[in-house]
Image (cartoon, helix red, strand yellow):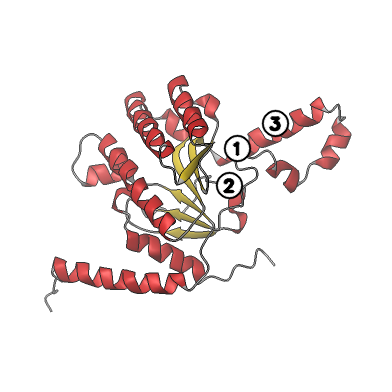
Amino acid sequence: MPVRLVPAPARDLAVRIYARRLEQWIRNGPIPQHVGVILDGNRRWARAMGYTDTAEGHRRGAGKIDELLVWCVEFDIPIVTLWLLSTENLERDAQEVGDLLEIIEDKVRDLAADQDWRIRALGALDLLPDKTREVVERAQEASAGHTGRILNVAVGYGGRQEISDAITRLMESYAEEGIELDEAAKRVTPDEIARFLYTAGLPDPDLIIRTSGEVRLSGFLLWQSAHSEFYFCDPYWPDFRRVDFLRAVRAYQQRARRYGK
């Protein structure tokens, strides 16, 4: 039998109706207090759309962040963590890395001007070029007085690097106290290590979303995601829609969280 294609207007209407139903369900359930997002697929989106310059994908992806934050405000989600740049990304082609860093710098400046969000930088900032590091640090300082929601921007971030840095700082703190190695070893606990993570003082993410169809975390919030719920979806990040966000939150609500108990 021939396949019947649904006209675009009818398809769009069906999506809108479905989104309204999802929203009604969601508002009657628990809302995640911390959402992490792996913004994946920008380069593949650019290639699929016929762009020869993959930086166009990163530009579109940067614009999508504004929409995501509007959705998070709409559902009163107080903490959001965005993975903008991994430590591995820094090893890509120099031209591509340069373009990506410039896009990130512009976006972080814009985000710091949003009174709804207080910027917090996560990552090995010492690995970043001086200009990028300064932009991120200034954004953090400029938004320090903003009340309410926290927006973690993970730039130059790697999960293993974070744990390594945390243990290094922990041992340095013990050394400053004059604690001998044997005694220091007895004091090391998960809670002690957590005090020195990039996210120290913040609750672990309830929900982690990854776009682009990849089903892995790639080291994102490696320590903090031990009891997180994961949602993987097919759209590349620039194509991520409100209905995709609603589906992610709905999937989170449908799971029984036992925290290993």
| Residue that carries the numbered disc 3 in the rendered image | 168
> Which quadrant, please, contains the N terminus?
bottom left
Verify CB contact (< 8 Å) between mark 1 and mark 2: yes
- Residue 115 pos. (x, y %): 44, 43
Image quarter hosting the C terminus: bottom right
Residue 151 placement, left or right of 109? right
Q: Is residue 64 left or right of residue 121?
A: left
Identify whether 84 is placed above or below 135.
below
| Amino acid of disc 2 | Leu
Crowd rating for badge 1 (residues with CA inside 10 Å; few <14, some 14–19, many 20+):
many
Q: Residue at x 27, y 46 (%)?
A: 45
**In this view of the protein, which residue sits in the foreground, 125 or 49?**
125
Above or below residue 28? Residue 179 is: above
Q: CA distance from mark 3 to mark 1?
A: 10 Å
Query: Are there few (<14), some (14-19), or many (20+) residues within 10 Å of tag 3?
Result: few
Q: Using the image, tell me which numbered label, if any, was put on residue 222.
A: 2
Q: Secondary structure at mark 2?
A: loop
Give the residue number, with chain letter if any, for mark 1.
162
- Tell me the distance, in whole angstroms, between the alpha carbons under discs 1 and 2: 9 Å
Rendered view: 48 above or below 94: below
Q: Which of the marked residues, 3 or 1, is nearer the chain's N terminus?
A: 1
Tell me the SS state at disc 1: helix
As drawn, the residue found furthest toward the top would be 130
Residue 44 badge:
none
Q: Amino acid at mark 3?
A: Thr
**Residue 91 vertical placement versus 3 (above, below):** above
Q: Quadrant of residue 193?
A: top right
Quarter where residue 90 is shown: top left
Whether tag 3 and tag 2 are in contact, CB under 8 A, the answer is no
Is residue 9 shown left or right of residue 98? left
**Is residue 146 in view from this perspective?**
yes
Q: What percent of the width, then of the height, locates residue 60?
A: 28, 43
